[in-house]
Image (cartoon, grey):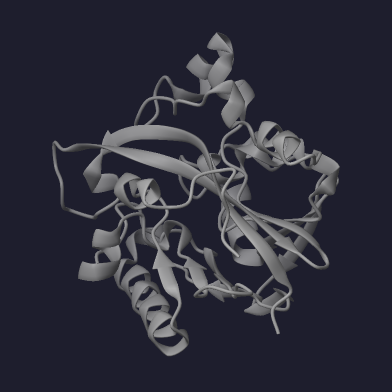
């Protein structure tokens, strides 16, 4: 039986970039708007965050903004002050210390930058992902996002975080990418694809992300097919991670899924 009680999608900013970054070799010259999402999972045994978004300090401060984003693939994300995770938590009567586990699907800057807010928590990440990040396997890893004094819980297999919350290995976009299966107490289960699938187009047409670890497109497509198979077998909804049309159909904070 699931231990999940509530599930909140949280919008923590938006990026604009050429679509080819999401759909490999498709969308040249087409600029899309992409939500940066974090997911809060409340359970009977604590609270879990899937990803933590960007480091707000690197976006709001002009010097840091220039240093990190001036020569990047695309400009800095747009992140409003009220889109910081602590502000969402405050509206629920919570503090950062009320988060027990941060589960990092991967460690790119728009998924792990907010770790600085949760140095007390247990940080779950795939072992190969942490190594790739520290080795700076690609330019979307900002080294100081994850070089602090964190309580790393390194894993190298699929496992249950708590009853009803299961980590799924989906390498391809990065070497140790992880998706998450969430069994709700009432509605359909949900699979957070993470960046295994930015858009519904990635899922429906089995298109690899634009950025693939070591250009291993086949590995990325196998992970998409794996998620689709699990979705069929469990009846779970499979959610893309950076699809603005899909996000607009989600329940918006403070509404939640249960």
Residue sitting at the far bottom: 233
Q: Is residue 1 above or below residue 185?
A: below
Residue 67 visible (yes or no): yes
Q: Is residue 131 above or below residue 112?
A: below
Q: Residue 145 placed where, x, y %?
A: 65, 38
| Residue at position x 17%, y 53% in the image | 25
How many numbered discs sit on the rendered protein?
0
Q: Is residue 46 left or right of residue 240?
A: right
| Residue at position x 41%, y 76% in the image | 227
- Residue 98 or residue 169, whichever sits in front: 98
Q: Is residue 45 above or below residue 35?
A: below
Q: Is residue 185 left or right of residue 216?
A: right
Q: Residue 109 placed where, x, y %?
A: 54, 39
Q: Residue 188 placed where, x, y %?
A: 49, 75
Q: Quadrant of the C terminus?
A: bottom right
| Residue at position x 61%, y 59% in the image | 7
- Residue 248 or residue 218, whichever sits in front: 248
Q: Residue 106 placed where, x, y %?
A: 56, 55
| Res 146 quadrant in image | top right
């Amino acid at each position: 039986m699931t231990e999940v009680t509530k599930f909140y999608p949280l919008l923590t900013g938006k990026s604009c970039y050429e679509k080819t970054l999401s759909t490999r070799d498709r969308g040249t010259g087409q600029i899309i708007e992409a939500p940066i999402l974090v997911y809060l999972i409340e359970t009977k045994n604590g609270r879990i965050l899937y990803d933590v978004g960007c480091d707000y300090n690197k976006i709001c401060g002009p010097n840091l903004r220039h240093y990190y984003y001036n020569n990047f693939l695309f400009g800095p994300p747009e992140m409003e002050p009220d889109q910081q995770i602590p502000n969402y938590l405050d509206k629920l009567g919570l503090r950062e210390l009320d988060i027990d586990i941060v589960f990092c699907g991967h460690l790119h800057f728009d998924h792990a930058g907010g770790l600085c807010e949760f140095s007390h928590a247990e940080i779950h990440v795939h072992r190969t992902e942490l190594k790739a990040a520290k080795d700076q396997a690609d330019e979307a890893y900002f080294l100081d996002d994850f070089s602090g004094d964190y309580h790393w819980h390194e894993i190298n297999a699929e496992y249950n975080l708590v009853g009803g919350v299961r980590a799924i290995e989906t390498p391809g976009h990065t070497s140790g990418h992880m998706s998450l299966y969430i069994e709700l107490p009432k509605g359909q289960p949900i699979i957070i694809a993470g960046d295994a699938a930015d858009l519904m187009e990635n899922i429906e047409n089995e298109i690899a992300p634009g950025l693939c670890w070591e250009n291993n497109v086949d590995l990325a497509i196998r992970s998409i097919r794996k998620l689709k198979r699990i979705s069929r077998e469990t009846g779970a909804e499979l959610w893309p991670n950076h699809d603005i049309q899909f996000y607009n159909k989600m329940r918006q904070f403070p509404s939640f899924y249960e």
